[in-house]
Image: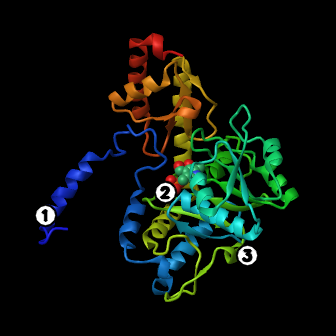
């Protein structure tokens, strides 16, 4: 650290230089992220609640109420009548809390967790931290976990099954209804990772898309991850964990020796009230109608992009279920590089050798039209290696 501090003006000027090196969402060229530009009301709420620490919530009763209300809004959306939960640092911490509870509830000597092959990589970290052995269940031709494979993976050491409602790579939704039935039959904890899909799927049926149940209406579902900092359009960090009921909390509680509340249930100790305030503000401001509007636009743009890609001769990995489009070229890796040279940031998924595009709320039709124009120019210039 320097001996004598710089002036405020000098510090801000230096900060600006760092910020200028970062990509922004406004030009629509970030097509690979599940985060987005925060909603304006979330920005304001976030700024107002910079002081409160939910890790010492007795000092900040207003923020604690806000967190409870934000969790209640998510619970109502996911039909969790008696649900409790927390606004945490993201999907990784939310998944961690779920499997921590599941492991402690089960008391198995050599605990295992059954994961779809498509599960988010956060589960690898979590298994390592919690001493869980991951056992992978295979996928069907539509990249959804096969219930028969899940059932075969269950042993007396299984402490949990995980299903994903909106996979990170393809946006597919596992058959959670079937996983729930398996969980009930075998008396195993079922966690649903809806970090991405949890704020999309509940709105789809009303707009004519087919979406199966994946939430607490299903008896076996014991917890759900749903992240405000993805489709909830809040600033990072804001993850959400919901448990079916408060009984689970006993398995993840830690007594605090000196704070204003006796127990802590999250992995993070000090937690910003700003995350909860921003989530609450977006939920209250948009309501279901506002979310539907945003989801409808994302889904329409998804259809626009996927049908144009097919018309250009590219192969879709699957027909999109949510707002994620994945497609292949003859040399997909090379195409990713060429798109990057044109400023387009798409994900390359090695496991599937495909490009993956996430249509987040900051994406507009004009961005996709410009992307398709560049893509077809690239494909025309190098037809032999890029056309599928
Ligand atoms: C399905 C799913 N689960 C978990 C996560 C991890 O979330 P985070 O990066 O907020 O920890 C992601 C991130 O993209 C995700 O898509």
Q: Residue furthest top?
A: 384
Earlier residue among tags 2 and 3: 2
Q: Is residue 356 above or below residue 46?
A: above
Residue position for label 2: 229
Earlier residue among tags 3 and 1: 1
Q: Quadrant of residue 137?
A: top right
Residue 180: % across, % down: 79, 54
* Dot 3 alpha-carbon crowd within 10 angstroms: few under 14, some 14 to 19, many 20 or more: few
Residue 228: % across, % down: 52, 59
Near-viewer residue (43 or 145): 145
Residue at image position (40%, 51%) is 37
> Are discs 2 and 1 less than 8 Å apart at CB?
no
Q: What element carries label 1?
A: helix
Residue at image position (13%, 64%) is 9
* Dot 1 alpha-carbon crowd within 10 angstroms: few under 14, some 14 to 19, many 20 or more: few
Residue 40: % across, % down: 39, 58
> Are discs 2 and 3 less than 8 Å apart at CB?
no
């Amino acid at each position: 650290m320097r001996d004598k501090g710089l002036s405020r003006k000098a510090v801000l000027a230096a900060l600006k230089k760092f910020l200028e090196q970062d990509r922004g969402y406004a030009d629509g060229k970030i097509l690979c992220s599940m985060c987005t530009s925060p909603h304006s009301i979330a920005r304001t709420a976030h700024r107002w609640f910079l002081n409160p620490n939910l890790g010492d919530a007795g000092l900040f009763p207003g923020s604690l109420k806000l967190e409870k209300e934000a969790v209640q809004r998510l619970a109502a959306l996911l039909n969790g009548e008696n649900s409790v939960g927390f606004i945490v640092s993201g999907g990784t911490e939310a998944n961690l809390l779920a499997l921590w509870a599941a492991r402690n509830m089960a008391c198995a000597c050599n605990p295992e967790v059954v994961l779809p092959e498509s599960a988010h990589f956060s589960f690898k970290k979590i298994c390592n931290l919690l001493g869980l052995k991951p056992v992978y269940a295979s996928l069907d031709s539509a990249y959804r976990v096969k219930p028969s494979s899940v059932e075969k993976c269950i042993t007396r050491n299984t402490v949990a099954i995980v299903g994903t409602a909106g996979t990170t790579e393809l946006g597919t939704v596992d058959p959670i209804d079937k996983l729930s039935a398996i969980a009930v039959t075998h008396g195993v904890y079922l966690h649903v990772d809806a970090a991405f899909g949890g704020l999309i799927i509940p709105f789809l049926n009303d707009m004519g898309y087919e979406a199966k149940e994946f939430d607490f209406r299903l008896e076996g579902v014991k917890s759900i991850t749903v992240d405000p900092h993805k489709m909830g359009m809040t600033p990072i960090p804001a993850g959400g964990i919901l448990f079916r009921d408060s009984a689970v909390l006993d398995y993840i509680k830690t007594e605090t020796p000196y704070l204003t509340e006796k127990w802590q249930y999250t992995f993070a100790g000090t937690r910003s009230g700003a995350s909860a305030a921003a989530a609450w503000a977006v939920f209250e401001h948009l309501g279901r109608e506002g979310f539907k509007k945003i989801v409808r636009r994302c889904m329409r743009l998804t259809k626009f992009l996927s049908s144009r890609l097919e018309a250009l001769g590219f192969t879709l990995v699957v027909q999109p279920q949510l707002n994620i489009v994945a497609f292949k070229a003859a040399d997909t890796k090379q195409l990713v590089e060429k798109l990057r040279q044109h400023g387009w940031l798409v994900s390359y998924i090695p496991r599937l050798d495909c490009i993956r595009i996430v249509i987040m709320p900051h994406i507009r039709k004009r961005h996709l039209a410009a992307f398709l124009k560049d893509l077809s120019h690239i494909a025309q210039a190098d037809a032999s290696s890029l056309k599928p």
